[in-house]
Image (cartoon, rainbow, N blue to C red):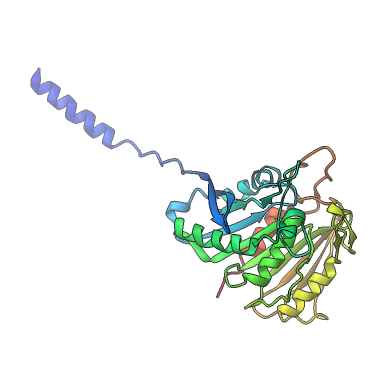
Amino acid sequence: MKTLSIILGIFLVFALSCQPTQPAEPTLRRTEGTLTVDGRNRFYLINLPPNYDQSNDVPLVIALHGGGGKGSQMESDYLLTEKANAAQFAIVYPDGVQSDGILGARTWNAGTCCDYAVEKNIDDVKFIRVLIDELIKKYPNINPKKVYATGMSNGAMMCYRLACELSNKIAAIAPVAGTYAVTTACQPSRPVPILHIHSKLDAKVPYEGGTGIFGYYFPPVADGLSTWVKNDGCASTSKTVSTFPNYTLTKWSNCTNSAIEFYFTNDGGHSWPGGVKSRVAADDPSTAINANDVIWEFFKRYQLP
């Protein structure tokens, strides 16, 4: 009996060893973090893609919420984390500084806009610079040459400021429903590829310029694009314009190691194309394009030298 038990035991071990190994479930990492910058606690939410541990070439997208929003709101309304996991890039949602008023609105100091961040002259460029350095150090599989920034409204305006002042750290930007609000001389150290998305129906940050959200005057979107056509060494007269049923795409592609693309939708208003309507009074998101798809396809083409 003892011999039989030993034989059965050996057979069982052999049988189990022959079973196909089930692949381990990918580990999703979604965590909150805090940084102290200029004596203020600054908050962020980061999501790492399923392949993070298997790659040393993970891109990082910085997603900047609109005025009055926050990182977690941007994540839930614009579906960027789902895109990040599918396309295998890391995404971080920083929070703008919060006002001490009743509403406690969070904003970015993008130049002339917006609100508390401008009034207190918050150095948000420094915050993003420190954040990039911290994340690259903490998550070494992130490729420092593949760091990008996108943003909505006030966050889009902040993208333009980052392109001016952090062009050595950010490979490309994609502003949505914002405009160029930088007040100081824009002196990037290199050409910065830019993809801008806007709606003809946007009344909060009007395409033609004018008074909009928070009672601020916003310059025309075309003025900011013209600034970057010059910054990126593009010939202003050499561009292609493609018209589709629900949007127009303008491209400046003969730039210096760069490109500028502008998606101008006929629908959507002040919203994130392809996103979720965040509240009853909000504009319906455009269905002409999916912002997440076109932004990522654009970002993939560029990295820092």
* Left or right of 30 in this view: 69: right
Q: Nearer the viewer, residue 250 or 18?
A: 250
Residue at x 68%, y 47% (from the top left corner): 70
Residue 58 drawn at (x, y percent): 51, 59
Quadrant including the N terminus: top left
Residue 139 visible from this viewpoint: no
Residue 244 drawn at (x, y percent): 84, 60
Residue at x 48%, y 51% (from the top left corner): 51
Above or below 164: residue 120: above
Quadrant including the C terminus: bottom right
Task: Single out the residue that lies furthest toward the top.
Answer: 1
Residue at x 75%, y 42% (from the top left corner): 103
* Left or right of 275 in this view: 199: right
Residue at x 88%, y 57% (from the top left corner): 200
Residue 214 drawn at (x, y percent): 84, 52
Residue 138 drawn at (x, y percent): 45, 56
